[in-house]
Image (tube, rainbow, N blue to C red):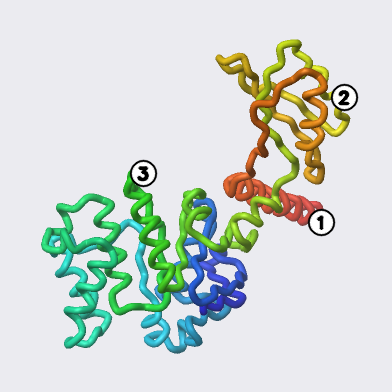
Amino acid sequence: MIEVKNVTKKYGNFTAVDCISFTVKDGEIVGLLGPNGAGKSTTMNMLTGFIEPTEGTINVNGYDIMKKTKKAKKQIGYMPENVPLYMELTVKEFVSYMAELKLVQRAKRKEEVQNVLKETGLEEVQNKLIRNLSRGYKQRVSMAGALVGNPEVLILDEPTVGLDPKQIIEIRNLVKKLGKKHTVILSSHILSEISQICERVIILNKGKIVAIDTPQTLEEKTKEKNILLLTVEDKEEKMSYLQNKIKDIQKLEMIKDNEDGTKQYQIISDREIDLRKTLFEVLPKEGITIFELKKAETTLEDAFIKLVNQTEKKEEKKTKKGGKK
């Protein structure tokens, strides 16, 4: 388990991280999400013990990262952003070197290295120089370096940055696989990655925690309206009068005129009102044929933007009030 309590990091008068607290349970995959300058990298560096908090405490499996640094760091495998590797080494040489640095017992080192190479899908390229590998394989090598020594906690900083779509899927699947054996914290600015990989999300903005929840709950909480997508055949063009017949419709808008003669509409109502049953009752009576009716899903991206905007507006109000005084 990772426990972060009232952690602040200041650089002179600038506060990079502002009194954050959260816990990560054993076996969880948790995403750290935020815009540039939100405090993600600073938080990651404090979790790994690379930099010291100005205030607060960080415990990794019961060890204070500052007071019992060696024992705490032994619990952690860290994959930094931008893949810092020794390009003149082969894959196997690099992972072996990392095993040596992490004090893996000499008698078990060879077996440990081979297990990690297998787990990260690097067996076929283990004798190649790292500089000759693709970006995707270099990411795997960096992850292998974090995995060697079998740490209980993996901290991955932007693990898919700079990869093509195929490589992103490969790394995403690898992280999911690793999550079955390790506690994983990963940072990313790619919202779809967080949504598909992580069980919980911690959203940071300007050094503060904006929200902590599952991607699904965040999406639901930030949904203000109920939006339906309706595809119909409407030969007599009665859809334009539908808003008069169903008073709960706040907005009715045609968004697509299909080649097969059908039209797609967006229908907006209050969050608490689900119009699907009403539409199925009313439209056939009007001679309108329903081809498709579905809810427009709120995404983690929608939730993220809304939460960040809300916090920024609150900060603006505080600043204005402070100025008036």
Count of all numbered marks drawn on residues in the image: 3
Q: Is residue 94 left or right of residue 279?
A: left
What residue is disc 2 on? 245
Pointer 1 or 2: first along the chain:
2
Q: Are marks 1 and 2 in contact (CB under 8 Å)?
A: no
Vertically, is 173 above or below 269? below
Label 1: element kind: loop
Can you tell which of label 1 and label 3 is closer to the viewer?
3
Name, please, the residue furthest toward the top: 236
Can you tell which of label 1 and label 2 is closer to the viewer?
2
Percent coordinates x, y for residue 26 in the rendering = 50, 77
User: In the drawing, what numbered circle is on residue 325?
Assistant: 1
Disc 3 marks which amino acid? Pro
Q: Is residue 42 left or right of residue 6?
A: left
Vertically, is 295 above or below 62? above
Instruction: Give the image quarter of residue 181.
Output: bottom left
Pointer 3 or 2: first along the chain:
3
Q: Residue at x 71, y 11 (%)?
A: 235
Disc 2 marks which amino acid? Lys
Instruction: Give the image quarter of residue 228.
Output: top right
Pointer 1 or 3: first along the chain:
3
For the residues labelled 3 and 2, the Cα–Cα distance comes to 46 Å
- Name the quarter where the C terminus is drawn: bottom right
The residue lying toward the viewer, choosing from 269 and 40, is: 269
